[in-house]
Amino acid sequence: MPGSDLTRFQLPPLFNLPKSQLQCYGEAAYSIGTDMLSRCNSGESPGERFIAVVAWSISTVRPAIFGVAPYNPVLGETHHVSCGDLNVLVEQVSHHPPVSALHATNEKENLELIWCHYPTPKFYGASVEAEVRGKRQLKLLNHGETYVQNSPNLSIRFLPRPGANWVGNVIIQCQETGLAAELIYRSSSFLRRKGNHRSVKGKIFESSSSKTLYEIDGNWDRTVRVKDVNNGKYTVIYNAREALSGLNTPMVKDPKEVWLSESAVVWSEVSQGILSKDWEKARQSKKAVEEKQRELLRERESKGETWIPKHFTVCHSKEGGWDSSPIQKWVPPAPIVVPL
């Protein structure tokens, strides 16, 4: 029915990507060809750093493939990867509703990412829209600055032309500098005007006075630029081809140190079935993963136990949603690494 919550809906393997949603969240942090996080840290002024943060924020938006979706992570599933000096750890901290927590740190750059995501997909007849609730924090510890932002929503449209796009408003705020930004993501219209396809527009402004400092315009899958309203100068701040080309696949550096909860381990048999197009193997393997989770739930309920995340503390936020805090100050190096 239109408006129905789809969080408990299970796709058959034929419509699954051979990866978990946790891996997709992690990739948004570590899978990038240029070190845009370091650029955030190296800006000499608050304005330069804020523009770099906006560019990095846009870089986390990746094209979605219509017709297929990643696996829904199981409770306690993790994804732990290192890319250079950046160590990333993601954990599924709740199953119903599905809540994922991410912690990434770079001790050399002295920066930290803390994310908490919980998508709420709903069916609207000709489309599905997944509102990605929760917040993202980027902490530039050398500068004592924390940048807080939300995520755009994923819109999957069946008619008149099938497609998947990111839409909605993203607000980025830094309380310490008093700067803020508003980004508006739009998909193409029914007429499919080329300039509007995957467009992002917005502004950077002073929170106290609402004075606009920069205007933002472009396409998040191509290039985005800012215009300094004081002098009219344009600067390209994001080039998708440079940022997302030549990406390397993570590889296992130390098999003995890979946790059994790692996404690639949990879903290995399912992924093998999908990649070999052995759909019966994929279906049976996915059924086994899901049944194991039901069995663990029954065991906890029979003992009166409540599941507790290993790497995060989780609570309800003041806004009525979910929030997470990492238990460790720094994410340790991972046994899975991205070759540089």
Image (cartoon, rainbow, N blue to C red):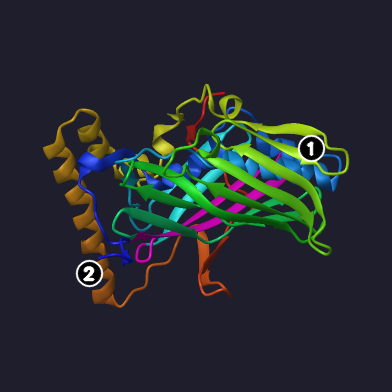
Residue 98 falls in which quadrant of the image? bottom left
Q: Where, by quadrant of the figure, is residue 175 drawn? A: bottom right
Magenta region, residue range: 95-122
Residue at the extreme bottom: 304
Residue sitting at x 44%, y 50%: 154
- Mark 2 Cα-neighbour bin, 10 Å: few <14, some 14–19, many ≥20: few
Q: Is 71 within the magenta? A: no
Regarding mark 1 in the picture, which secondary structure is present there? helix
Query: Residue 217's x, y, as percent?
Result: 66, 40
Mark 2: which amino acid? Arg
Residue at (31, 38) in percent of width and height: 17
- Name the side, left or right, on which 61 lies relative to 23: right
Relative horizontal placement of residue 208, taking residue 63 as reference (left or right): right
Q: Which mark is residue 298?
A: 2
Residue 328's x, y, as percent? 59, 55
The disc label shown at residue 42, or none: 1
Picture coordinates of residue 33 (x, y %)?
A: 58, 27
Distance Cα–Cα, label 1 vs label 2: 51 Å
Task: Check whether the beta carbons of the residues at disc 1 and disc 2 lie within 8 A of each other.
Answer: no
SS label for mark 2? helix
Mark 1 is surrounded, within 10 Å at the Cα level, by few (under 14), some (14 to 19) or many (20 or more) other residues, namely some
Residue 320 % position (x, y): 52, 75
- Relative side of 123 to 302, left or right: right
**In magenta stretch: residue 117:** yes
Image position of 241 with respect to 139: above or below: above
- Residue flagged by tag 1: what amino acid is it? Ser
Residue 12 in sight in this render: yes
Residue under the point 54% across and 39% down = 196
Q: Earlier in the sequence, mark 1 or mark 2?
A: 1
The quadrant of the picture occupied by the C terminus is top right
Specify whether residue 261 is in view: no
